[in-house]
Amino acid sequence: MPDELRLFLKERFGVQGPLSPGRFEAELAKRLGSPARRAPLLKAWRAYLAQGGREAVRSFYREVLKVPKGEALVYGMHLPHLEFYAKELPPRVEGRVLEVGAFTGALVGFLQRKRPDLEWHALDGVEEAVEVGAVGTALTDLRPGGVARFGAKRVDVVANRGFIPKGTPVRVVEVRGITVVVEPLEE
């Protein structure tokens, strides 16, 4: 399966092969040329390496996606991990599968082709996925946990009191860490 994944990444994103983090700056120089054009991305890259954290990751990915075929650089750096997961995941996963991490988009796209029988959805940071006051619809019975849709996003939620039937309009009343609490929307 690694050969199949490499072909998928090459055709879809232009990934030529593994890219060590040490070669990242050399690849940028080839793609962007002048040091001035590379400066914002290199600053974000160094912050990403030095401190990590959500804001550093976001800043890095925001900048790398401005580079022609920038996603190929990211997927090239993560290729060994992608190959491992592409080999190990398809026979093991069941039910709903979450996409976690910025670099896994290509992997999820590849795995969706391998396992179309599974339901796939992305996992955003909860505060980005839904805010207090957002209105959506229960996609499952909430007993008290279940799933609701807010716009185009499917979010795992917990009812604030009792049972809420599937199809009921709901409103977010609280976000605690990764827990989204909803109540039925009164008409």
Image (cartoon, rainbow, N blue to C red):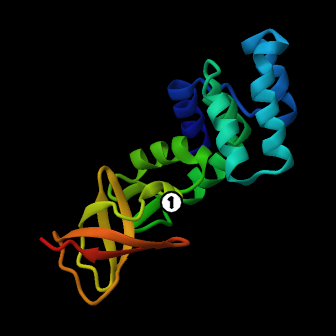
**Residue displayed at 27% across by 90% down:** 162
User: Residue placed at 24% from the left, 73% from the top?
Assistant: 140
* Residue 139 horizontal/vertical position (percent): 24, 67
54 versus 170 height, above or below: above
Q: Is residue 20 visible?
A: no
Residue 61 position by quadrant: top right
Q: Give x and y (percent) for residue 10.
A: 58, 27
Determine the residue located farthest toward the bottom in the rendered image: 162
Q: Is residue 84 visible?
A: yes
Using a 10 Å C-alpha cutoff, classify the residue at mark 1 as few (fewer than 14 neighbours), some (14 to 19) or many (20 or more). Answer: some
Which corner quadrant holds the N terminus? top right
Give above or below for 176 relative to 7: below
Residue at point 73% right, 38% down? 77
State the image quarter where residue 38 is shown.
top right
Q: Amino acid at mark 1?
A: Glu
Relative placement, left or right, of 125 versus 183 is right
In the image, is 35 to the left or to the right of 187? right
Secondary structure type for disc 1? helix
Check the image and report above or below for 33 versus 62. Answer: above
Q: Residue furthest top?
A: 34
Q: Report which residue position mark 1 lands on.
A: 127
Outermost residue toward the left in this view: 187
Q: In front: 103, or 176? A: 176
- Residue 92 drawn at (x, y percent): 50, 66
Quarter of the picture containing the C terminus is bottom left
Residue 57 percent coordinates (x, y): 69, 45
Residue 150 versus residue 105: which sits nearer the camera? 150
Q: Nearer the viewer, residue 42 or 71?
A: 42
